[in-house]
Image (cartoon, helix red, strand yellow):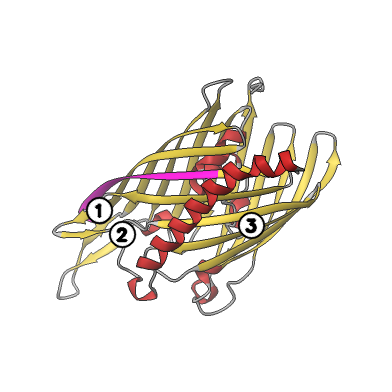
Amino acid sequence: MNNFKKSLIWPAVVFSAIIFSGFTNAYAFLSKNDIGTTSAQFLKLGIGARSAGLGNAVTSVYAATDSIYSNPANLSYMTQKELSFSHAVWFEDINYEWLAFALPTQKAGVFAAAVQYVSYGNIARTDNTNVSDGSFSPLDMAAYLSYANRYREIYFGLNLKYIYSKIENSASAVAADFGVNYDFADNKTSIGAAVTNAGTKMKFNKEEENLPLLFKTGISRFFTNNWLVCLDLNFPRDNDFYLNIGTEYYIAISENADICLRAGYDGRNKDIPGFNWLNIGFGLRYSDYCFDYAFVPYGDIGMTHRFSFGIKFGKEVNK
């Protein structure tokens, strides 16, 4: 027991420092009055149907290549090459896509890359007399390069990303994400923390705006071998603190196949009028292939659907 307690000292100190620093800095800029004061809002949309089904409470949860977005530290769990694609059926003519690839190595850690892309379709342009003047096609894009590794019980990861937005004029920025995760000795409980979108300002014409910096920390636990519960605390630059909660339950169909049922609450949407408090979804896995779906309501704004597909290939890496 004494050895077990000693083994927790190092990760406990690290996480205490990170969480204390994050809370301190978060409360320094945390304000609902700052809504609309940051750019590149698409960076808040979340990634992947599994994460959405869990209410995006995945800071401490291994989420395959979607971990690039949620917490790059969790890429360290990967043992096979993986390619994934996500598509969201959004409002009006908006299309939201995510494409990611991860490459684990035996000794050098895990390398990954991803592209996040939002297309808003064609929007009619009018002049100040309300006369039609053609159309324009806004878009948002972010390209990620990621690295993750582990030191003893501590997992850590880093993203470098290029962010680009176009309305009629365009703007760009560079940013970094950093995350850590720790598994307790029971192999059932994990805690994690991440800082995302720390970078330069975006400038449209003469206006410069900050990126939507976010500090988040989370905990997850397998209460049985097939039942997971997870919780995240989020501290954004441009809004109030909010809470995410998720759960999933695995049902084995055969040795190589299973189905997973999910439900979650995403507190980021709590102020939207109407039904918005419950995300639901499911996942299907067969051998090295997986498919996930999530239903995400946005109250009176409308309903959205997310679909993800992933494939693992190559030999497993023995770390």
Report which residue position mark 2 lands on: 39
Mark 3 Cα within 10 Å, few/some/many (few <14, many 20+)?
many
Label 1 to label 3, Cα distance in Å?
Answer: 32 Å
Q: Is residue 131 left or right of residue 122?
A: left
Foreground: disc 1 or disc 3: 1
Q: Is residue 219 left or right of residue 207?
A: right
Whole-Å distance between the Cαs marked 2 and 1?
Answer: 8 Å
Q: What percent of the width, then of the height, locates residue 38?
A: 31, 62
**Range drawn in magenta:** 167-180
| Earlier residue among tags 2 and 1 | 2
- 299 to 101, vertically: above or below: below
Query: Could you tell me which secondary element the residue under label 3 belongs to?
Result: helix
Q: CA distance from mark 3 to mark 2?
A: 26 Å
Q: Main secondary structure of the magenta part?
A: strand
Give the labeled residue for mark 3.
Answer: 53
Which residue is outermost to the bottom? 273
